[in-house]
Image: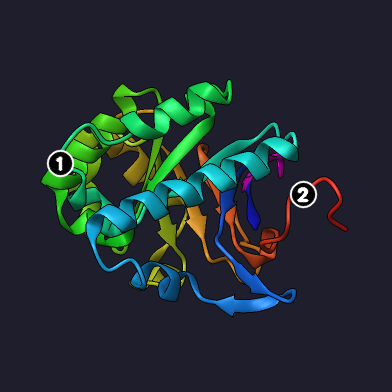
Amino acid sequence: MFQPIVDAHSGEVRGQEAFLRVLGHGQPDLSPWGLFSAAADDERLIALDRLCRTVHLLNWLLAASESLLFLNVHGRLLAAVADDHGRAFRRVVDALGVSPERLVIETPVAASRQPELLHLVLRNYRRHGFQVAVNLESPAHWPAITRSAPQFVKLAMRSSGWDDHLDGAVLGDLLHCSGRETVVVLTRNERPLAGTLPGRVWLQGHAYGSPRSCSPDAE
């Protein structure tokens, strides 16, 4: 399943985030949490995580999408891989003839609480040519991750009071403090946002498109 990520100004689809759905007889049969929980040891979890990303990549290629592909990595994988995150997946990407710059490796919210580990992980993925995205649960975590230079920072609209405190000025200040060409992706938008947003803001959520199949024969 893929959910569109749109430019706040043009409305153009800039990216697609891949979501895992395990179906049995056409209906949800096993949650992603349940699937990954079945991988008791780190070695199996790492293999499962890479397999899921490879399947997402293959489906995205079949759909001939021109947008970026956002791929989540499991939190346990970040600590389980000692170093050189992204090396194994880069071999898959090269074998399929895909430019790694079109892929965005997305870290979970929990990773923002460990800035040193996050910095190592993002540096490794970027060294292998991937773009990177960080999920933040609070604006307070922003200063700690700026030196990691993520191309994308994702902020959920329903967490940590963002609905009450988020406005164009706040976003503008955060973007200015980043000192880079960072793009902010506002997620979990259940209704369209009103008002003027600064540049380099993208939007994601049911208000801008629900997750759906991206296969060529999808309705």
Q: CA distance from mark 2 to mark 1?
A: 35 Å
Q: Where is residue 144 drawn, in percent x and y? A: 17, 47
Say which quarter of the image contains residue 35. bottom left
Q: Residue at x 33, y 45 (%)?
A: 174
Task: Point out the tag, 2 or 1, that comes first from the N-terminus.
Answer: 1
* Residue bearing the label numbered 2: 215
Residue on which disc 1 sits: 82
Seen in the picture, residue 149 relative to 194 is either above or below; the reply is above
Q: Residue at x 15, y 46 (%)?
A: 117
Q: Nearer the viewer, residue 56 or 206?
A: 56
| Residue 179 in which image quadrant | top left
- In the image: residue 69, left or right of residue 84: right
Q: Main secondary structure of the magenta part?
A: loop
Considering the image in quadrants, where does the N terminus appear? bottom right
Q: Is residue 192 left or right of residue 77?
A: right
Indicate whether 122 appears above or below 207: above
Choose between 196 and 9: the one closer to the eye: 9
Residue 13 makes an appearance in the image: yes
Residue 186 in the image, given as x and y percentages of width and height:
49, 55
- Front-most of 144 and 104? 104
Above or below for 46 versus 126: below
Q: Nearer the viewer, residue 136 or 200?
A: 136
**Magenta-drawn segment:** 6-13
Look at label 1 and name its amino acid.
Ala
What secondary structure is marked by label 2? loop
Residue in view at x 49 percent, y 22 percent: 94
